[in-house]
Image (cartoon, grey):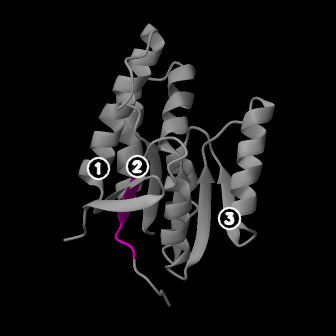
Amino acid sequence: MTNSPLPSLTLVVGGAASGKSAHAEHLVTATGRSRVYVATAEAWDDEMRAKVAQHRDQRGPNWRTIEEPRDIAAALSSVRATEVVLIDCATLWLTNQLMAGADLETESRSLIAALTSCTAPVVVVSNEVGAGIVPETSLGRTFRNAQGRLNQRLAASADQVITVIAGLPLVLKAPA
């Protein structure tokens, strides 16, 4: 039995350290369903390992965690319709794809297809990276543009879109 229903796909987007992950976790927990956390981060250094540990500690032990930096479809294939999924985050997923030399257009289409065909409700966390300065490097600009396009696709496919600024959620798109 669920306490607070979620639509099929929710996007929670915001800047770095805006509170978007905490809000997404709250949305997922409020459903009362068994929770699945799909972690896309790859901890290559001490700072990232500390961030991953902080997120894990914040969530607590009542989550089934799937560590999948690139193949979200495979991660979602193990999810039951009675569960709820949090993917944290699309930004790191995109980074992993870019650094692996993947075709970002193809991978983004595949991601959207996997999200929209999942039988459980899914909440996706993503960073808004286009509100700052223009990146100095070509790689930075490529990433910023690809992230903007991905966020637009996620928002178009989502039933609900919430932005989080300074820890405050603002609904941009509500379920019909």
Task: Please name the residue shown 37% across and 17% down the image.
Answer: 134
Residue at far front of view = 166
Mark 1 vs mark 3: in front: 3
Name the disc covering residue 155, or none: 1
Q: Is residue 135 visible?
A: yes
Question: Mark 1 and mark 3: span between their CA atoms?
Answer: 25 Å
Mark 2 belongs to which amino acid? Answer: Val
- Amino acid type assigned to the residue bearing label 1 in the image: Ala
Residue drawn 42% across the image and 60% down it: 168
**Residue 110's spot in the image, x, y percent?**
39, 41
Q: Which residue is mark 3?
A: 59
Label 1 secondary element: helix
Kind of residue indicated by mark 3: Arg
Q: Which residue is mark 2?
A: 13
Asked if 74 appears above or below 161 in the picture, the reply is above
Q: CB under 8 Å between callouts 1 and 3?
A: no
Determine crowd level at label 1: few under 14, some 14-19, many 20+ residues with C-alpha closer than 10 A.
Answer: many
Q: Is residue 104 left or right of residue 37?
A: left
Find residue 173 and report its horizontal and vertical position in percent.
Answer: 24, 60
Quadrant housing the C terminus: bottom left
**What residue do we see at 56% from left, 21% from top?**
99
User: Could you tell me how far apart the alpha carbons at marks 3 and 2 are, in whole angstroms?
Assistant: 19 Å
Rendering coords of residue 63 (x, y %): 68, 68
Q: In whole angstroms, how far apart are the C-alphas of marks 2 and 1?
A: 9 Å
Quadrant of residue 68 within the rendered picture: top right
- Mark 2 in CB contact with mark 1 (< 8 angstroms): yes
- Looking at the image, tell me whether mark 1 or mark 3 is earlier in sequence order: 3
